[in-house]
């Protein structure tokens, strides 16, 4: 695929046209409508205490909340290294999130950002489709196909993950490289670098592929992309001590091979997804998929069930989904340039292909949303809501996995499963070990939670409701409360 002008149309054929302004207006309206719908679903999930994504939403909320309050970039909800640069993953974008949090100090901001990052990818896909085909109708169809794709709904419905920024960043970078527009390319590269440290590997791979793909600017965009990735890689290699926490290129991870039933589930997912809009992949578009190679192990690791429509590993598909979409859009544009009369058919295929594929995923997401709405109508949920209203913003809270998101956004919060771990001291821990109830003054747990066996006469039951109990410390521990983090 090169950027030569499209072939002259048959004079007896009047192709469908659309102005660029109308394309951007319709794309923006579609993104806004879908974003409102998905955000409402996410807020319902938050109110219903959906445990599928409580962990990382609460984890990032604590980091952002502490940073906005002038404390360490840290969270006690995961026993991992703390600090903006010492965390296991490096997310420069959190600086911008903290700035927004000063203006909107609520966990709902993170929910909205996750939806927004995912859906915003439709803009650069629209631009790429228009630029590659010479027709804004293809651009609008490319945007709609993204918004209607079940994996995109999964990503938008997941917990907050900075990894989602990879999707609009990658699409912007490829669009900018295709059109030879430096500002688009640079913005895309910046967003990719701001997302997570794995982009150092992927940018190098993106550049290698773009160098071999005919673009407006020739090889220079590919070389520039690889240089950005290499500079980022060297920066992290020199300054980030736990850069290789998850992936060392000299020691590629070899996970347990997936069992037969998991392998079959993944092949079924891929087979259904290939029936969608992104099946037209001429050489230039197909090459883009090769740039996912540095993280390809994520697709074979038995512990990461990425084919599921919900769960903590949905975000790991993000880099591949956007590459797949860009490749498919370029393929669709190639087809319409080669055979202009196919434009209505290609546009219909882009929109309907993704709207109709992966029906099991879409049904699972719908059932999940329905179950959450039903949960909100349960009298037990109202009782739990009343119980949580008793917890003040300054309380030092211990709770379980299900409620950590609802109770996050305070100086001290712990998962009760991290208390009294005699034999599991994290290697970086410098404070006293094990962590005990002396750090807390409030417990919100089920009546059967094992942590209750450690209560003494300093604690008293204050309230019950919705399957949970609220316990308060009646007197502080001797010497006062220890600091919240090591």
Image (cartoon, rainbow, N blue to C red):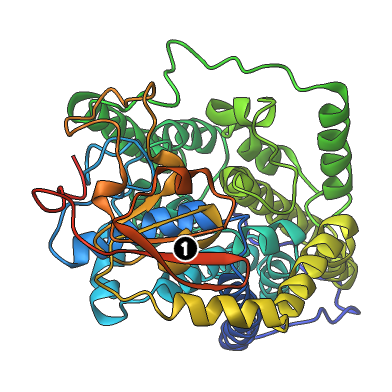
Measured from the top left, where is residue 441 in percent x and y?
28, 60
Which residue is at a point 55% across and 32% down the rendered structure image?
Answer: 212
Q: Which residue is mark 1?
A: 405
Q: For this view, does 247 lie left or right of residue 432?
A: right
Q: Quadrant of residue 228?
A: top left
**Horizontal and vertical percent for residue 317?**
62, 44
Residue lying furthest left: 479
Kindly tell me whether residue 248 is visible in this rendering.
yes
> In the picture shown, does residue 215 fall above or below 133?
above
Give above or below for 333 relative to 272.
below
Decide if residue 198 is on the left or right side of residue 152.
Answer: left
Looking at the image, is 393 positioned above or below residue 84? Answer: below
State which quadrant residue 46 falls in: bottom right
Residue at 67% from the left image edge and 53% from the top image edge: 325
Which one is in front, 22 or 101?
101
- State whether residue 481 is above or below residue 127: above
Q: Residue furthest top?
A: 251
x%, y% of residue 408?
Answer: 38, 64
Depth check: give the residue in front, 45 or 254. 45
198, 381: nearer the viewer: 381
- Please give the count of numbered marks on the rendered protein: 1
Q: Nearer the viewer, residue 271 or 173?
A: 271
**Quarter the C terminus occupies:** top left
Residue 141 percent coordinates (x, y): 74, 72
Label 1's element? helix
> Are there few (<14), some (14-19), or many (20+) residues within 10 Å of tag 1?
many
Residue 27 visible in the current orientation = no
Instruction: Give me the residue at 33% from left, 48% from top.
Output: 91
**Residue at the image point whose x is 36% and y is 25% from the top:** 422
Q: Is residue 70 left or right of residue 437?
A: left
């Amino acid at each position: 695929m090169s950027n030569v002008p499209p072939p002259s149309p048959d004079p007896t054929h009047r192709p469908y046209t659309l102005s660029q302004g109308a394309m951007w207006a319709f794309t923006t309206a579609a993104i806004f409508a879908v974003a409102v719908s998905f955000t409402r679903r996410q807020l319902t999930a938050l109110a219903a205490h959906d445990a599928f994504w409580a962990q990382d939403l609460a984890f990032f909320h604590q980091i952002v909340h502490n940073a906005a309050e002038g404390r360490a970039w840290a969270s006690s909800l995961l026993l991992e290294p703390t600090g903006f640069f010492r965390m296991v993953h490096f997310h420069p974008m959190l600086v911008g999130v903290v700035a927004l949090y000063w203006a909107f100090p609520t966990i709902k901001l993170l929910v909205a950002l996750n939806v927004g990052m995912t859906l915003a990818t439709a803009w650069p896909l629209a631009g790429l489709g228009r630029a590659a085909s010479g027709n804004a109708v293809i651009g609008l169809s490319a945007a709609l196909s993204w918004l209607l794709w079940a994996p995109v709904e999964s990503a938008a419905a997941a917990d907050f993950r900075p990894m989602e920024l990879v999707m609009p960043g990658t699409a912007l970078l490829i669009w900018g490289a295709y059109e030879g527009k430096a500002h688009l390319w640079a913005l895309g590269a910046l967003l990719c670098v701001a997302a997570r440290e794995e982009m150092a590997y992927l940018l190098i791979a993106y550049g290698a592929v773009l160098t071999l793909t005919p673009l407006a600017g020739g090889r220079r965009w590919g070389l520039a992309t690889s240089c950005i990735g290499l500079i980022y890689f060297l920066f992290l290699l020199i300054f980030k001590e736990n850069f290789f926490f998850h992936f060392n290129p000299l020691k590629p991870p070899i996970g347990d091979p997936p069992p037969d039933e998991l392998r079959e589930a993944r092949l079924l997912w891929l087979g259904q997804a290939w029936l969608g809009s992104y099946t037209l992949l001429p050489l230039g578009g197909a090459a883009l998929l090769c740039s996912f190679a540095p993280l390809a192990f994520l697709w074979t690791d038995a512990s990461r069930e990425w084919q599921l429509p919900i769960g903590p590993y949905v975000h790991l598909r993000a880099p591949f989904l956007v590459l797949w979409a860009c490749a498919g859009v370029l393929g669709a544009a190639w087809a319409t340039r080669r055979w202009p009369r196919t434009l209505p058919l290609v546009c219909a295929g882009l929109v309907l292909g993704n709207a109709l594929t992966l029906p099991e995923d879409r049904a699972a997401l719908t059932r999940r949303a329905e179950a959450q709405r039903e949960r909100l109508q349960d009298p037990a949920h109202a009782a739990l809501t009343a119980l949580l209203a008793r917890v003040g913003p300054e309380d030092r809270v211990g709770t379980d996995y299900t409620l950590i998101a609802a109770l996050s956004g305070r100086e001290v919060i712990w998962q009760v499963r991290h208390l009294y771990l005699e034999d599991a001291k994290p290697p970086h821990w410098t404070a006293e070990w094990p962590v005990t109830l002396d750090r807390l003054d409030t417990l919100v747990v089920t009546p059967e939670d094992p942590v209750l066996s450690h209560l003494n006469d300093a604690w008293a039951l204050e309230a019950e409701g919705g399957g949970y109990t609220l316990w308060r410390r009646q007197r502080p521990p001797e010497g006062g409360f220890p600091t919240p983090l090591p």
